[in-house]
Image (cartoon, rainbow, N blue to C red):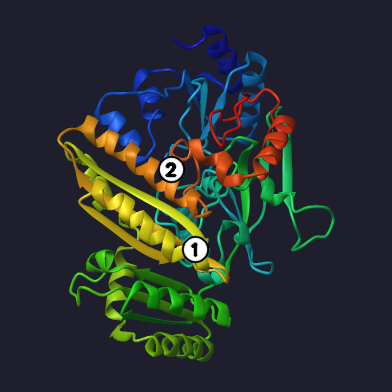
Amino acid sequence: MPDSALVEHLRRAVGTEAVRTDATELDARSHDTWPVATVWAKLGRHPHRPDVVVRADSVETVVATVRTASEHRTPVTPWGLGSSVTGQPLPVRGGIVLDLSGLVGEPSLSEIDHTVTAPAGVRGSDLESWLDRRGYTLNHSPQSLARSTVGGWLATRATGQFSSRYGGIEDLVVGYQVVLADGTVAQVEQRPRAAMGPDLRAVFLGSEGTLGIITAVTLKIFSRSPHRSLEAFTLPSVTAGLTVMRTIGQTGLRPALVRFYDAAEARHAVPEGPHGSPVLFLGHEGIGDVARAEHAASAEVVLSAGGVSLGAEPVDAWMARRYDFSSIESRLAEPGGYAETIEVANLWSRLEPMYHDLRRELTPLAEETLGHFSHIYDQGSSLYLILLGRAGDDRTALSRLEEIWARAMKVVVAHHGEVSHHHGGGLARQPWVAQSLGGGHEILRRIKDALDPGHLLNPGKLGLDPE
């Protein structure tokens, strides 16, 4: 049962309508879209259930909630739209779930500065549509665009499908407003770059609400590209594909789209075939002559590595379905069905050995183990794995998911890779946080102690609980 004194204090501070304690509301905030949490729900389990939900519709409500929580020594876990796939918004210590999806309103556009400012609860697809009507785009396109908030992008250090040209959220954010654990409201920004101390924008990016609660965001925007060139290619091997990606990236070409599917996932990416070969999706955009020239230069790299063009049709088809998550959801809805997505990253020199070891370890745990590489950098790339399987019942499916995570993270740590590229840590990666961050974890601990000495903001995440 929730603390009655806490509930009454919250009602006085933020209004009765904003405070919810009914079982349906509490159950809904005890599961995000992490497959493990989805199976928990199927089994009727609610291991991380809040005591009370506060629906915020203003910065003032956020401040009042945080201050009330501090007085009652009660944890506060921020919640956007619950689309995390790693358990980031689950309240592992109970307490208050602070629902930020009501922080919405008309964005503010600066056409001169090419920025847009929006409340943190604005849905990504809503903001993109608003900009599109005015001839602009965010060029930030996570698969969860219609299921996630702009504040959530910062809190989870998200990235999008065109990041190889435009960068991740860390490259697109200009500034933001954040509420600290004591209720202080701070504005963090640079105009457009600064050499006055460290770049404090980075402090809260990827912090998963453990250091502060983001309430408004200013992002870069871009004019709609007048031209886009798209093309798919088969390649003779994973080695050839990774060499092509590395060469394109290190030559200074800037494709908007680079997705290289291994032969297993290529059957899904290009269902009409040909099958048995890895497939590369490639796209450039911008001013027509420049985009066409860059695409021709990249295509030459692909063809010289044994690539064979399949034309634009496979990429056009993917562009039309790229936000579709139904195959994962459908499998999870089956009795005993399980599915998982694991995204990691590594340097070019370590990427292929890590890929082969992951496939060897994970293939016995699923009916299908699919892989693709995307989000290229000069030094390396991400690797995205999809696992689909069926077990005898949901309890066995849950055990299988837990084993998938344990094996995958063990392999990535052994190869000195990044255990997350863009989904974040949450609960899924909690046991591997310290190994992933190394000496940086002690720095993060000290920042946490300074900004949230009571350890009330989203406890149980990023390995920051007091020992």
Please name the residue shown 34% across and 37% down the image.
Answer: 402
Quadrant placement of the N terminus: top left
| Relative horizontal placement of residue 167, taking residue 133 as reference (left or right) | right
Mark 1 Cα shell of 10 Å, populated few (<14), some (14-19), many (≥20): some
Query: Where in the figure is residue 19, as x and y percent of width and height?
Result: 49, 21
Q: Say which of 381 and 32 sits in front.
A: 381
Query: Where in the figure is residue 61, as x and y percent of width and height?
Result: 60, 29
* Residue kind at label 1, given as amino acid type: Arg
Please name the residue shown 69% across and 38% down the image.
Answer: 442
Residue 195 at least partly seen: yes
Query: Where in the figure is residue 86, as x and y percent of width and height?
Result: 43, 41
Q: Say which of 355 and 63 sits in front.
A: 355
> Can you name the residue that lies furthest to the right here?
196
Quadrant placement of the C terminus: top right
CA gap between label 2 and label 1 equals 28 Å
Examine the rendered structure and indicate whether residue 463 appears above or below residue 107.
Answer: above
Please name the residue shown 36% across and 18% down the image.
Answer: 23
Label number found at residue 320: none
Question: Dot 1 lies on which element?
Answer: helix
Label number found at residue 350: 1
Residue 135 at least partly seen: no
* Residue kind at label 2, given as amino acid type: Ser
| Relative horizontal placement of residue 362, taking residue 81 as reference (left or right) | left
Q: Nearer the viewer, mark 2 or mark 1?
A: 1
Examine the rendered structure and indicate whether residue 321 appears above or below residue 300.
Answer: above
Choose the circle earlier in sequence order: 2 or 1: 2
Residue hosting label 2 = 84
